[in-house]
Image (tube, rainbow, N blue to C red):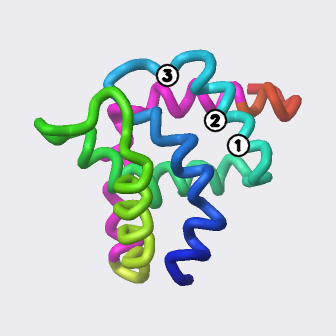
Amino acid sequence: MDAQTLVDERGELWLALAPLWLDREPRERDYARMVEVIQRHELTLTELEWIFRIELAPVLSRTQMSVASEWRRFDDYQLMKRLVAHNLRLTGWRRKSWALFSGLITMMTRHRWNELMTRVMIARGEIP
């Protein structure tokens, strides 16, 4: 997959989910936007989980752990460049390595993710 295809297919979703890694709890407005974007992409909860763990967390957790991180908001352009670069390299052993360690790198945002998935399930009429 090329960079433009990644941006076209995932860009909106990646940027909508990025606030999960900011230094503040997402606001109602943030969660509402995330749910709205997720609904447009028509992904299963399992697909969303892997996007969270493999496509987003390796890049965004580095920002979260950095002393000089962007704590209040992200530069969308720079973030998209890092996400695309990561995902273009995400094949074979890299994908398996991130899958193996994804539990560790998602620990700091797991409670936010669980809250978001509950809201997605409610929006879909499923029982959380």
| Left or right placement of residue 32 versus residue 17 in this view | right
Give the image location of residue 12, x and y in percent: 61, 52
Residue 107 within the magenta-colored segment of the rendering: yes
Task: Give the CA distance from mark 2 to mark 1.
Answer: 5 Å
Residue 121 numbered mark, or none: none
Give the image location of residue 64, x and y in percent: 26, 38
Q: How many marks?
A: 3
- Give, as a three-letter code, the residue at label 1: Val
Q: Tell me which residue sits at (32%, 68%) in the image.
A: 97
Task: Give the CA distance from mark 2 to mark 3.
Answer: 10 Å
Residue 34 numbered mark, or none: 2
Element type at mark 1: helix
Q: Are marks 2 and 1 in contact (CB under 8 Å)?
A: yes
Query: Where the C terminus falls, by quadrant?
Result: top right
Give the image location of residue 122, x and y in percent: 79, 26
The residue labelled by disc 3 is 26
Going from N to C along the chain, the mark reached first, 1 or 3, is 3
Query: Where the N terminus falls, by quadrant?
Result: bottom right
Q: Tell me which residue sits at (35%, 62%) in the image.
A: 82
Q: Are marks 2 and 3 in contact (CB under 8 Å)?
A: yes
Up/down of 17 relative to 9, above or below: above
Main SS class of the magenta portion in the image: helix
- Give, as a three-letter code, the residue at label 2: Met
* Front residue of this view, candidates 124 and 40: 40
Q: Tell me which residue sits at (56%, 30%) in the image.
A: 114
Boundaries of the magenta span: 94-119
- Give, as a three-letter code, the residue at label 3: Pro
The residue labelled by disc 1 is 37
Task: Give the CA distance from mark 1 to mark 3.
Answer: 15 Å
Say few, some or many: other residues with alpha carbon within 10 Å of mark 2 (under 14 / 14 to 19 / 20 or more). many
Going from N to C along the chain, the mark reached first, 2 or 3, is 3
